[in-house]
Image (cartoon, coloured by chain):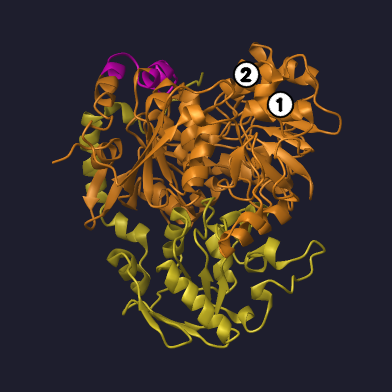
Amino acid sequence: MPKPFDKLTATAAPIMRANIDTDVIIRIERLVGNSIRGTLGKWAFGSLRYLADGSENPDFILNREPYREAEILVTGPNFGCGSSREGAVWSLQERGIRAVIGSGFGDIFFANCFQNGILPVVVDKAVVDQLAADIEATQGAGKVSIDLEAQTIVSPSGARHSFEIDPRRREGLLKGLDEVALTLQRDGEIHAFQAADRTARPWIHFQKTPASRTSA
Amino acid sequence: MPGRSLLEKIWDQHVIARLSEDTDLLHIDRHLLHDLGGSRGLLDLKSRGLKVHNPELTFATPDHALSTAPGRAGTSKIGQELLAALRTETAASGITLFDVDQPGQGIVHVIGPELGLSLPGATIVCGDSHTCTHGGLGALAFGIGSSELTHVLATQALIQKRPKTMRARFEGKLPLGVTAKDMILALIGHIGAAGGTGYAVEYAGSAIRELPIEGRLTICNLSIELGAKMGMVAPDEKTFEYLRSRPYAPQGEMWDLAVKAWRELPSDPDAVFDREVVIDVEKIIPQVTWGISPEHVVGVDGLIPDPKAVDDPARRAAIETALEYMGLQGGAPIAGTPVDWVFIGSCTNSRLSDLRAAAEVARGRKVAAGVRAWVVPGSENVKREAVAEGLDKIFIEAGFEWREPGCSMCLAANGEVVAPGQRSVSTSNRNFVGRQGPRARTHLASPASAAASAIAGAIADVRMMGR
């Protein structure tokens, strides 16, 4: 069940390269296995964070103070594109990230954020660029504030920007709602749909325990 | 009122409940599980004290973590554990598993269509972003994350926001040597890797109508590389011919009923799309990527972009980063770049027609010295059909390695990697940093172009190979 999200004032790190895909956020070999939760924070942005010999890359922003403590990422266009791996969100979360602010995100990454209580904020690219510039002007010392209830972000310069968010998504984050539990409350409707659909589209529905059909 | 699009028609047939103006609870008709996330989802469900809502609509196969070496030699311990867990948990839930060495096993996005599990008008999900592939049959198919996967197991439904609609029309006659892969890479190059974000894309136009189903699956496969998690092609006679008598497709009277309904699905002539793009396919030449995003693509006779010629600082920096990673010089021709690896496989290009196209180029030729070239069929059935027509022999005689079906080196989840710094021409879908292994350099291309590059030992223009 996701933790609720309402307000956050924290160090923010700009990672402005376009098209940072979820493979770059977390490599696939870190996700192979059923006991990976809790092991991923160390490997978030692995290929950017570590040099070939395994040592920290001093040039990567999350390896520098005060960005090491960042709880907010300010991202370039199309952050989180590519693979559906929810491990990308888990790894950011385990690294301490609670919100991402960008001009656009990969659709599946965006959905996965909400499932884990991470707030993805979409604002115009000009706002993202200004935010990144304001953060850099304070060398990261200036914090960014996000208020989900009020739908505003405040830059280190004091500039306030409002953002749009789907009201359902907003409520889900504010209350930390579990979608599975919510949908199960509609199980009667799901069964009613399936009963009607068995008549409308019988070819979609199989017998409950499929006889071992031989395949090709 | 304007006509309705393919997307809108399928969407409306699946609404269980309207949750807000633009968000619905949708019924999911087919749920596909694989070894990387399948057992994790089933265990998650169990830990919540829940049962699989419709195990008979859920199907599983191992593909990601299996070795593709003969006899599956070298499957890692963790890969074996995932396979064992998939077997145990699917059996416990009454979910059909297409297991190793059985007809039906293979890359989820190859077996769904091949078995007739994927049908026009169906909603199909899988914990894998390339689920959009199944849209090639006129399905509404998309990738989901782990939480949504658990949601579908528990409820056979999913909460989804209605996407915007885009129609990409490919018009004209495909030139010789140009394939479905080149068409979709050209579109990605044209509108960018985020050009489709938030949209469901319908591929249409005369060149799409002419494409066989396997080509349409390839086109839809790369929808996610456009940013669109859903891509689709309206079903037509080719679709019905492809599906007829597939094991899980409807049979007899049920077939007739289904086809009658499927004929109603194509977008109405007056349907309105939020965005329209038109591509003249006669201008497309074989495509190859040069960078670290699928939008970093050029014609094989083209030049690697020169950052010095780019004014926009962000774009210039992006090109410089990509060239540095790829070890390439801006301004140089892409053709002739020496390669170490060639990978023919993946949910993009591992079907029988892909292997035939590559074999046609490889027949009677030899893989260049110093190049390692793999052919990894997409499924057990593809493998058997390819062997039956002797494609394996053509590849082996040419010096390719012929492997067992699976995802393999597309994403290297099973440890099959391109070594650091080495250069690969791959028929897969992602040239991301480290995708085929840490610091591996990937160039995406069609099966024919990949085979030509294996023979040449360098990125090659298949049109120069004289076949």
**Is B65 displayed left or right of B185 in the figure?**
right
Chain letter of the residue carrying label 2: B
Can residue A1 be seen by looking at this rendering? no
Residues B296 and B103: in front is B296
Give, as a single range, the part of the protein colored magenta: B238-256
Q: Which residue is drawn at the image coordinates 55% and 32% (left, top)?
A: B181
Q: Residue furthest top?
A: B389
Q: Amino acid at mark 1?
A: Ala
Q: Which mark is residue A162?
A: none
**Is A199 displayed left or right of A214 in the figure?**
left
Q: Nearer the viewer, mark 2 or mark 1?
A: 1
- Location of residue B4 with respect to B360 vertically, above or below: below
Give the letter of the orange chain.
Answer: B
Q: Which residue is drawn at the image coordinates 35% and 37% (left, top)?
A: B29
Q: Amino acid at mark 2?
A: Arg
- Location of residue A93 with respect to B383 vertically, above or below: below
Location of the N terminus of chain A by quadrant is: bottom left
Q: Which mark is residue B452?
A: 1
Measured from the top left, where is residue B425 in percent x and y? 70, 37
Q: Colour of chain A?
A: yellow
Measured from the top left, where is residue B237 in percent x and y? 35, 17
**Is A207 displayed left or right of A53 in the figure?**
left
Q: Which mark is residue B356?
A: 2
Hey, which quadrant is residue B404 in on the image? top right
Residues B230 and A140: in front is A140
Measured from the top left, where is residue A11 in percent x and y? 54, 82
